[in-house]
Image: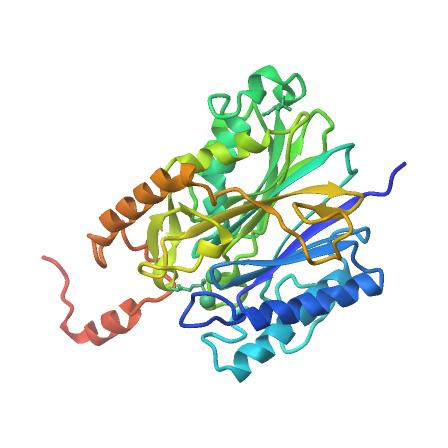
């Protein structure tokens, strides 16, 4: 039996240049140096340091399984090195997602978010990495539902004999810390009943029912609840395996042609439209947004991320395909700006702002407290 490969994406916002815009290049460089040490020690097979908006995303491949202490510690050290630079440069929100003073075996609950999947590498292994800024894990629920539950999006659900067997979805209740696995196509409507409530439910993982392994996994760490107070939206990542019984690359991308409203831009307290763009274009531009969604792709080759770099290129020097860079997405971007402007026309009124339980900032308790004496019962 072949050894199973694990692909881990661990991400954190540890400070950025000019508000919540982008990490300084030297922070990314410091993270790269730390992960390169992991190649030397044999902990990692390969890695790629990237970002979306102000979030640093560490893509790593290894044979150590999920939740591995050494891999997580490496990521932690990379974020600590980047934090140090951010602090020295007095960048904004330096160390924002670092909630612990010291690493204690796993990144979970320590602030950074993680999506990890373990599988037997196939003869050809095309992978996509979605990365979002200024939003929350459940932002992937609508597009992933389209991909895995809707044959009008994924024709493969109808014409690929393995995909027709359906998918198991692990759904998390991020408020109550509960999970359940449900199966498509039989339970599709019940699954959508839960997933439609994006304030509470999110897709964690999708598995092929035809034995093709894990198809998709999302980072669902609810950072604001982990910390017990607001310290930043989760800005989630989603890893996807493609083709051969799993959705095709293009089927994963298709839902992003729709203009979708997601929660989390400006002070983590507003709804705005997903703006698909190149990594280089992922700095927030208007009202700290609109919420960016990027997608990069690699072929996995015996644990190495193969992009457009030379076969001999050293670990870290990867050149992924940047799927949302092209002009075919211009129309969606224009629509995203229009939809976001429409929401902004509501100012501080719902539905531009989130529901009261979801607001990351609120002055309501203080206002109500000050009004206590003047407040009267209705007749
Ligand atoms: P090719 O025939 O180009 O390999 O494409 C097959 C496919 O499934 C594309 O979605
Ligand atoms: P980040 O979560 O990307 O740090 O953004 C915080 C925010 O709400 C900016 O308006
Ligand atoms: Mg930030
Ligand atoms: Mg961010």
Q: Nearer the viewer, residue 272 or 102?
A: 272
Q: Is residue 197 left or right of residue 38?
A: left
Q: How many marks?
A: 0
Determine if residue 313 is in view. Answer: yes
Residue 370 point in image, percent of width and height: 22, 76
Q: Quadrant of residue 58?
A: bottom right
Residue at the limit of the structure toward the bottom, as seen here? 88
| Residue 316 sits above or below residue 342 on the image | below
Residue 61 point in image, percent of width and height: 74, 52
Q: Quadrant of residue 2?
A: top right
The residue located at (28%, 44%) in the rendering is: 339
| Residue 74 sits above or below residue 250 on the image | below
Residue at the limit of the structure toward the right, as seen here? 1
Residue 14 point in image, percent of width and height: 54, 70
Q: Nearer the viewer, residue 97 or 354?
A: 97
Q: Is residue 332 left or right of residue 163?
A: left
| Residue 163 sits above or below residue 366 on the image | above
Q: Quadrant of residue 95?
A: bottom right
Q: Quadrant of the N terminus?
A: top right
Q: Nearer the viewer, residue 91 or 163?
A: 91
The residue located at (36%, 53%) in the rendering is: 290
Determine if residue 195 is in view. Answer: no
């Amino acid at each position: 039996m072949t050894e199973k490969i694990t692909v881990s994406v661990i991400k954190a916002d540890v400070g950025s240049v000019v508000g919540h815009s982008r990490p300084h290049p030297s922070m990314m460089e410091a993270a790269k140096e730390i992960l390169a040490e992991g190649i030397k020690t044999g902990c990692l097979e390969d890695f790629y340091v990237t970002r979306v908006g102000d979030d640093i995303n560490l893509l790593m491949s290894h044979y150590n399984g999920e939740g591995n202490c050494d891999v997580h510690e490496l990521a932690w050290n990379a974020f600590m090195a980047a934090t140090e630079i951010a602090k020295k440069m007095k960048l904004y929100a330096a160390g924002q997602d670092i909630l612990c003073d010291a690493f204690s075996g796993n990144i979970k609950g320590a602030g950074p978010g993680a999506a990890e999947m373990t599988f037997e590498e196939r003869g050809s292994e095309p992978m996509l990495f979605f990365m979002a800024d200024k939003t929350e894990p459940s932002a992937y629920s609508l597009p992933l539902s389209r991909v895995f539950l809707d044959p009008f999006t994924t024709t493969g659900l109808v014409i690929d004999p393995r995909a027709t067997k359906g998918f198991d979805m692990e759904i998390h209740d991020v408020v109550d810390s509960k999970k359940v696995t449900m199966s498509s196509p039989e339970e599709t409507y019940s699954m959508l009943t839960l997933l439609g409530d994006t304030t509470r439910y999110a897709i964690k993982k999708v598995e092929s029912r035809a034995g093709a392994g894990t198809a998709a996994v999302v980072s669902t760490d609810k950072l604001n609840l982990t910390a017990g107070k607001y310290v930043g939206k989760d800005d989630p990542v989603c890893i996807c395996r493609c083709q051969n019984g799993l959705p095709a690359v293009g089927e994963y991308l298709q839902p992003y042609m729709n203009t979708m409203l997601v929660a989390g831009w400006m002070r983590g307290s507003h709804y705005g439209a997903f703006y698909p763009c190149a990594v280089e274009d992922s700095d927030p531009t208007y009202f700290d947004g609109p919420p960016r969604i990027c997608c990069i792709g690699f072929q996995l080759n015996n644990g190495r991320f193969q992009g457009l770099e030379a076969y001999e290129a050293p670990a870290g020097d990867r050149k992924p395909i940047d799927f949302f860079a092209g002009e075919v997405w211009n129309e969606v971007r224009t629509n995203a700006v229009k939809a976001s402007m429409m929401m902004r026309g509501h100012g501080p009124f719902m539905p531009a702002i989130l529901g009261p339980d979801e607001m990351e900032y609120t002055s309501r308790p203080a206002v109500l407290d000050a009004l206590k004496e003047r407040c009267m019962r209705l007749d």
